[in-house]
């Protein structure tokens, strides 16, 4: 921090609210030193002119605005409500410009060391998963990006904050018998949702956000306009899905397929889903694992991985490769293809001579054994 000469001009360099500032003053070093002193005094007194009135927005106030103007337009609205509720508890009372990357690191640490309400069977405490912490951080980052776009902040303190490394290799899927048990124990409103998940591989948010206009019964297609990848996707429906959706009682005042008595889309089905799992005796299973079940059953039925990738909406094959080991004979098919190719290097005469040689050796071996 100080005065800097650059290309015949003097600049002042200083920090304000954890952010580095640099201003061009001119050709006079003395003037630059005077301005720098004034900046230091203004910062100390909280009167620095860069802290504008419109920027003095408390985090909780902006959170409400973010939910109303941004999250409400997305299918993740109800998830955002929960996450932002946690963020408000932590950052309440702070102005947006006061929040630094250090504050975010402290939140990240506090959240990661938070104990879940539920405990494991052996009585050990279970902490919030890294993936769950990352979802909170992602929403916080999005809030500051939106604040910048709306002119309510000029800096995103999230810069430099790293997410936790996640283990995305978990693969839990249901066997056919378990699928039958689960469907038997689903409540009336839950069963069609689970059926759609098992037969399409769609994510929970995508299913709960489905509207009647997204369904093309004649073509057997579900149109997803708002996906995790931010791209439009067409999901094919089999007969089971078509019958299931047609059988859902349409609410006269709602555009959503899966909604409550008031016509509002279900915000969360976690409680009823856990109840169904408990009655079915299924443990260590989440709703997202229905997506894994869809993919796993396809692979075990012999469907190629690239087709599974397209059905899941994965951009690359890397994410789909986790299911490759489930294919009962994918490795054998691979070496068979190679074998057929290598066979072309043998002439028919060579193959016949090799067969006679093997036959002769077997006869000699049999005589020796006798």
Image (cartoon, rainbow, N blue to C red):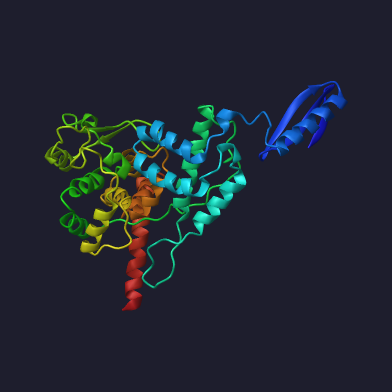
Looking at the image, can residue 198 be seen? yes
Q: Quadrant of the C terminus?
A: bottom left
Q: Position of residue 357 (x, y in %)?
A: 37, 60
As rendered, which of 296 and 159 lies closer to the eye? 159
As rendered, which of 272 and 15 lies closer to the eye? 15
Residue sitting at 15 percent across and 56 percent down? 184
Q: Position of residue 50 (x, y in %)?
A: 66, 29
Where residue 326 sits, quadrant-wise, is bottom left
Looking at the image, can residue 352 be seen? no
Q: Quadrant of the N terminus?
A: top right
Where residue 33 sits, quadrant-wise, is top right
Residue sitting at 56 percent across and 47 percent down? 104
Residue sitting at 34 percent across and 57 percent down? 172
As rendered, which of 143 and 237 lies closer to the eye? 143
Q: In the shown orientation, is residue 267 left or right of residue 143?
A: left
In this picture, is 29 found above or below 210? above
Q: In the shown orientation, is residue 4 left or right of residue 58?
A: right
Q: In the shown orientation, is residue 120 left or right of residue 278?
A: right
Instruction: Residue at the far bottom: name it.
Output: 370
In this picture, is 32 found above or below 132? above
């Amino acid at each position: 921090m100080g005065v800097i000469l650059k290309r015949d001009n003097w600049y002042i360099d200083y920090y304000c609210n954890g952010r580095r500032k640099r201003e061009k003053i001119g050709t006079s070093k003395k003037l630059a030193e005077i301005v720098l002193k004034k900046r230091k005094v203004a910062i100390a007194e909280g009167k620095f002119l860069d802290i504008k009135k419109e920027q003095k927005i408390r985090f909780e106030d902006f959170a409400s605005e973010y939910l109303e103007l941004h999250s409400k337009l997305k299918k993740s609205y109800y998830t955002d409500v929960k996450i932002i509720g946690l963020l408000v508890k932590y950052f309440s009372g702070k102005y947006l410009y006061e929040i630094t990357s250090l504050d975010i690191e402290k939140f990240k640490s506090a959240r990661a060391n938070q104990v879940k309400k539920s405990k494991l069977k052996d009585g050990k405490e279970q902490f919030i998963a890294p993936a769950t912490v990352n979802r909170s951080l992602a929403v916080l980052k999005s809030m500051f990006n939106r604040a910048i776009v709306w002119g309510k902040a000029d800096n995103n303190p999230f810069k430099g904050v790293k997410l936790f490394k996640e283990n995305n290799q978990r693969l839990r899927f249901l066997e056919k018998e378990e699928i039958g048990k689960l469907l038997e124990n689903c409540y009336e409103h839950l069963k069609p949702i689970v059926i759609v998940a098992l037969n399409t591989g769609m994510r929970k948010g995508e299913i709960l956000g489905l509207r009647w206009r997204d369904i093309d019964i004649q073509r057997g297609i579900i149109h997803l306009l708002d996906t995790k990848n931010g791209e439009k996707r067409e999901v094919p429906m089999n007969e089971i899905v078509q019958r299931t959706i047609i059988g859902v009682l349409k609410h006269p005042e709602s555009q959503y397929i899966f909604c409550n008595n008031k016509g509002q889309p279900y915000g969360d089905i976690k409680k009823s889903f856990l109840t169904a799992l408990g009655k079915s005796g299924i443990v260590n299973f989440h709703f997202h694992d229905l997506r894994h079940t869809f993919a796993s059953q396809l692979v075990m039925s012999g469907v190629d991985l690239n087709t599974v990738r397209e059905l899941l909406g994965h951009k690359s094959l890397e994410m789909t490769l986790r299911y490759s080991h489930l294919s009962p004979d994918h490795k054998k098919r691979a070496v068979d293809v190679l074998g057929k190719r290598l066979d072309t290097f043998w002439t028919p005469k060579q193959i016949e001579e090799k067969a006679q040689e093997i036959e002769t050796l077997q006869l000699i071996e049999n005589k020796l054994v006798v």
